[in-house]
Amino acid sequence: MQLSKTAKVHDLLKEYPFLEDFLVAYNPKFQMLKNRIARATVGRVATLENAAGMANLDIDVFLSDIAKEIEKHTGQRPELQTAPPGQETLREDKVKVLKEIIKYLHDGGDLNVARKRFSEAVKDVEASEIAAMEEELIKEGLPVSEVQRLCDVHVGAFRQALDEHAEVEAPPGHPVHTYMAENKVITELANELSRLVSNIQAGEKIDESFREALEVLDRLAGVDNHYQRKENQLFPLLERHGITGPSQVMWGVHDQIRSELKSAREAAEKQDKEEFLSKAAA
């Protein structure tokens, strides 16, 4: 077996369960591994490099100590996988490109151009690495609102790659399982609202479409409960373990969606076509 900085904490613990006690004793930051919610969320996507960064550890020393612990229990020392020449600077280069794209958007640049540049720059990274870059950008002083501007770019650039990844699995009743189930319902309602937006835009069955849109918006109002539970259950847990950037960005997205849903409903009640299309299509 090879041990690398890109190995997932979840996969490592699954193969070597004894490493849980080792890591918890190794650094106080890893106490989160004892929490089943953290284990099912952060642990599933975090790499050993992410974990080392969170605990301010030297990644090479960290990997070496893990290898020694594995050898102690199994009698076999895993081979440490080293990065190819130039790989060490890849992350820094991509963060630099992200900053350039954010500045470009801030100055009024075209979103499609930014999306293309983003896709070309970070097409080979995973969602967890994007979250790590957001974290780093915010810690360096970039306003959360500016990082939030890239959310649409994230989705557009990573849709195919994310769809190809296996979904995170969580048992029924687990908060993460509930979040995911609710996300599917929210997506279905958003798609239905999108259909009605198209009808109204085309001038088809205006009165009926607005009536149905109000019914869909009534059901979508439940998204606030979904957001509040994430904000009060998941975000504090992430923040206790030093992961603050992504949750701040997501909270901003939540507030934006809340505002747009409220405005869309007000417009639908007045059958204000222009305002409704502006807010509901967002």
Image (cartoon, rainbow, N blue to C red):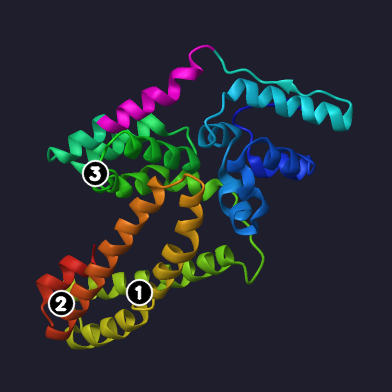
In the shown orientation, is residue 12 left or right of residue 186? Answer: right
Q: Residue at x 27, y 36 (%)?
A: 141
Spatial CA span between label 1 and label 3: 30 Å
**Residue at numbered disc 1:** 192
Residue 211 within the magenta-colored segment of the rendering:
no
Prevalent SS, magenta region:
helix
The residue nearer to you, when weighing 232 against 217, is 232
- Three-letter residue code for mark 3: Glu
- Residue 247 percent coordinates (x, y): 40, 53
Q: Residue at x 46, y 51 (%)?
A: 239
Furthest-right residue in this view:
75
**Residue at numbered disc 2:** 203
Q: Is residue 277 above or below residue 72?
A: below
Tell me which segment is drawn in magenta. Answer: 85-99
Q: In terms of sequence position, does the residue under pointer 1 or pointer 3 come before the other?
A: 3
- Element class at badge 2: loop
- Three-letter residue code for mark 1: Glu
- Element class at badge 1: helix
Spatial CA span between label 2 and label 3: 37 Å
Spatial CA span between label 2 and label 1: 17 Å
Q: Can residue 34 be spotted in the picture?
A: yes
Of labels 2 and 3, the one closer to you: 3
Q: Quadrant of residue 223?
A: bottom left
* Tag shown at residue 146: 3
Of labels 2 and 1, the one closer to you: 1
Furthest-top residue in this view:
85
